[in-house]
Image (cartoon, helix red, strand yellow):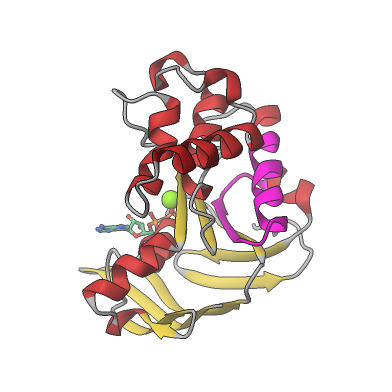
């Protein structure tokens, strides 16, 4: 369970988030939407505890993020898989090696790691691309590799920040379909996006932001119409 309680984040004189409150129960699938600059990525950074709120409280699995020890912070980040718009794959490693990386931090049985990586590559449809380097992949394949890396540890929470930003509409739907599948396998999935077409196709909970404020939060919803 994730809880934002009147969270405000300021960067100097810029208010990126203004008293934002919401709760996301375990195993949810949620879109966080809003135009560029609305505060979506700020929520992602706060969840990863890359910085603290200026005021208000954030809880993940009952833990107050402002009170984590270093050890608890490492544990928190391990239970969150992140998918980025620009993929952030290592250019000098193959798809297989990129996806294996998070596992190497937590286990050293090479055979077991290989098995788990092959499983997740199969899930995202990249079995045939395992030995290729990122530069050899198409955009949708890069995003699937990034997704595989995010979920290989079976994290409790998967956060995708504009995961479809660089993809054509059809490929974008495939990525969100995969994220839905990941949700059905048990992870909470949070997708930050300004892509109304995608949001409207999935009819899931939508938390909408505008200029740092939460303007609506509806179950089984569509991208809100704005003036
Ligand atoms: N590190 C930062 N320093 C200063 N301003 C920032 C920083 N990060 C975000 N902002 C500002 O906060 C606002 C919200 O940004 P962001 O969360 O990235 O929006 P979104 O992801 O919805 O496009 C923007 O006005 C942005 O310029
Ligand atoms: Mg953003």
Q: Is residue 162 visible?
A: yes
Q: Quadrant of residue 217?
A: bottom right
Choose between 194 and 90: the one closer to the eye. 90
Picture residue at 60% right of the left edge, 38% below the top: 119
Vertical relation: 171 (above or below) 175 = above
The magenta region covers 173-196
**Image point (58%, 79%), residue name:** 23
12 within the magenta span: no
Direction from residue 145 to residue 66 in the image, left or right? left
Image vertical order of residue 1 relative to residue 43, above or below:
below
Q: Which percent across, then down, holds residue 199?
A: 70, 50
Q: Residue at 44% across / 27% down in the picture?
A: 95
- Could you tell me which residue is drawn at 66 percent across and 62 percent down? 186
| Corner quadrant of residue 86 | top left
Q: Nearer the viewer, residue 109 or 157?
A: 109
| 162 in relation to 1, above or below | above
> Where does residue 157 sit, x and y in percent of width and height?
53, 62
Query: In which quadrant of the rendered image does the N terminus lie?
Result: bottom right
- From this view, report whether residue 210 is shown above or below residue 144: below
Describe residue 200's horizontal placement relative to residue 167 as left or right. right
Q: Where residue 137 sits in the image (x, y, percent)?
A: 49, 18
Number of residue marks: 0
Is 177 in the magenta? yes
């Amino acid at each position: 369970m994730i809880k934002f309680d009147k969270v405000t984040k300021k960067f100097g004189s810029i208010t990126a988030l203004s008293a934002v409150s919401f709760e996301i129960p375990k195993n949810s699938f949620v879109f966080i939407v809003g135009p560029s600059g609305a505060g979506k990525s700020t929520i992602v950074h706060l969840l990863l505890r890359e910085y603290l709120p200026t005021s208000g409280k954030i809880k993940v699995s009952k833990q107050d993020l402002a009170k984590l020890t270093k050890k608890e912070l490492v544990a928190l980040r391990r239970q969150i898989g992140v998918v980025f718009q620009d993929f952030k794959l290592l250019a000098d490693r193959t798809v297989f090696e990129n996806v294996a990386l998070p596992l190497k931090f937590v286990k050293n049985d090479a055979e077991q790691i290989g098995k788990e990586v092959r499983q997740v590559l199969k899930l995202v449809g990249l079995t045939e691309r395992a030995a290729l380097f990122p530069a050899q992949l198409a955009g949708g394949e890069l995003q699937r590799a990034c997704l595989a890396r995010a979920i290989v540890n079976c994290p409790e929470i998967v956060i995708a920040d504009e995961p479809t930003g660089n993809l054509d509409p059809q490929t974008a739907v495939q990525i969100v379909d995969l994220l839905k599948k990941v949700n059905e396998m048990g992870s909470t999935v949070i997708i930050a996006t300004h892509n109304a077409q995608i949001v409207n196709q999935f009819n899931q909970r939508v938390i909408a932001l505008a200029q740092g404020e939460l303007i609506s939060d509806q179950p089984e919803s569509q991208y809100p119409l704005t003036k």
